[in-house]
Image (spheres, grey):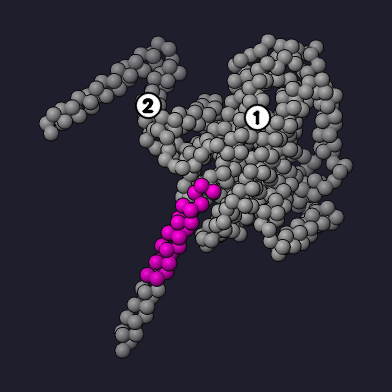
Amino acid sequence: MIKSFTSYNSNIRGRVIVLFLLFLLAIYLLATSGLTPFAAICMIPAIGLFLFLSFKQQNALFWYIFAMNYFVMGLQRYDYIPVPVTVVTVLPQLLLVMTLIIIPKKGQNSLANPMLLGLLLWTFYLGIQVFNETCGLPVSIGDWLTNMNFYAFYFIFAFVLVSKIINTPENIMRFLRIWAWFSIVATIWAWRQKTFGWDQAELRWLIGGAMRTHIIGGSIRYFSFFSDAATFGCNMGAAAALFYITSLTSKLRKDKILFAITGICCTYSFFASGTRSGLVCFMAGIALYVFLARSAKLTATVLLLGGAFVFILAFTNIGQGNMQIRRMRSAFNTKDASLNVRDLNKQALKKYLKDAPYGMGINIDESRIPRFNKFKVVYETSNDSTYVFFWQRTGIVGVYVFAAMNIIILLGGCFISFFKLQNKACKGISAAICCGFIGIQAGGYANHILLQYPNIILFYGGMAIVYLLPAIEPEYIAYEEKIYTKLEEKKRLKKEQQEKSRVKKLLSWT
């Protein structure tokens, strides 16, 4: 015991000496080199602690990544992140992947599924883009790797991390509940903007150039703490469909209420965003659920309500005094100016890109394309869609490969929901996520939102959950039964307590 106590004291003494030496070095650097080196040295103990906790608490690190992906753009707008965004989002993901390799999580789930196939197909195509010489510029391996990270590795990170961390019924429900609460917070933030106006940071951002796309023809487009109104609206439109469906299929009353409230909040949000694509995202998700639900009653109800909704927007002036409804109604106007501009941009791109089936490439610094190079026009033409964005950089071949990846992921998920799951709640979760996924894809076809935070971790990570469900369905059934047993026990105890109280009251009267 004395030996272990001596050893403990020796370890403490060693750590104190190291910290004291770091402190002296920090003071010296502050005096000789300024604040930045001083801050860097002071961060070393915090980084060490973060690394230690990452290996010990993999779940906690995942939830940090999940939350940071959701709020990072808002935090950056308020200058709460003094470092590049990738430092607080990408590096923790890399760190968590490393910890999972060194200390694998327990679980029977396999990564070998159609979703991985689709992701690898897309990654392989972007990999061979290193040989793309369309623009005739020197290849930059650094630019290629940077773009590989943003265009491919983000998707793989979301797939791997969710597959390996969110592989229990408890974590799946936690994933959905936290997502729901975050969506409610985003709605409250948009309501605050609409009711009380923008704060100083938001005004500064709007004046810096965003006002051009957020105040259009007298219509104000609210963006909450997302990167822009389009990302906010499409995210909320797809999430609305997802949470309405989970509310319908969930067995737990608390979850039903939470998800129903979230669906209502998300509906309010995509209207507040003024993003017409948000409505399309919602409708696409609900339309897919009609197919997956295999219910004639549900189909008839959705067709009736959906038809009435579309008829009101397309053929009447009901609600025309509300600028958000007016903005949504313009989605059915084929003569809308902004829609025509997008068509003109696509026609212009088509002329230039017919000679570039593999696009400009992702292995160059696009901003350095010379003026005399015809692909400078391609780079400078506005890309109002993720698919157009990839058309510019990876060509029509790349668009087909990217679309194939998403189709493989979606069809595999729908097959699981339709044929492989038996439990009602599991089928509801898988169907809801598939519907959210097709919704966000519809948004990505019309707006450049698929690569924006937090869509990848939510919707592609969500699809990873769908592929997990067949393996853990028995575990999910046991989890459900356990919860129901607890609820029944609480009801029984409450009833017994009420009965005892009633008897005691009667005795006191006698």
Q: What kind of element bears circle 1?
A: helix
What amino acid is at disc 2? Gly
Q: Quadrant of residue 3?
A: top left
| Residue 289, image x, y percentages | 68, 53
Residue at figure coordinates x 72%, y 28% from the top left:
398
- Left or right of residue 185: residue 212: right
- Left or right of residue 206: residue 77: left
Q: Which residues are magenta?
A: 470-493
Residue at figure coordinates x 77%, y 23% from the top left:
357
Q: Magenta region, mostly helix, strand or loop?
A: helix
Mark 2 neighbour class, 10 Å CA radius: few under 14, some 14 to 19, many 20 or more: few
Q: Could you say which is closer to the camera, residue 182 or residue 415?
A: 415
* Between discs 2 and 1, the one toward the N terminus: 2
What amino acid is at disc 1? Trp
Q: Could you say which is closer to the camera, residue 216 or residue 418?
A: 418
Q: What kind of element bears circle 2?
A: helix
Residue at figure coordinates x 53%, y 37% from the top left:
111
Q: Which residue is mark 2?
A: 48
Tell me if residue 358 can be seen: yes
Tell me if residue 73 can be seen: no
Q: Which residue is mark 1?
A: 122
Q: Could you say which is closer to the camera, residue 404 or residue 213?
A: 404
Residue at figure coordinates x 39%, y 37% from the top left:
57
Q: State how far apart marks 2 and 1 are (Cα).
A: 36 Å
Q: Could you say which is closer to the camera, residue 264 or residue 426?
A: 426
Please say if 338 is above or below 171: above
| Residue 99, image x, y percentages | 43, 31
Please say if 12 is above or below 498: above
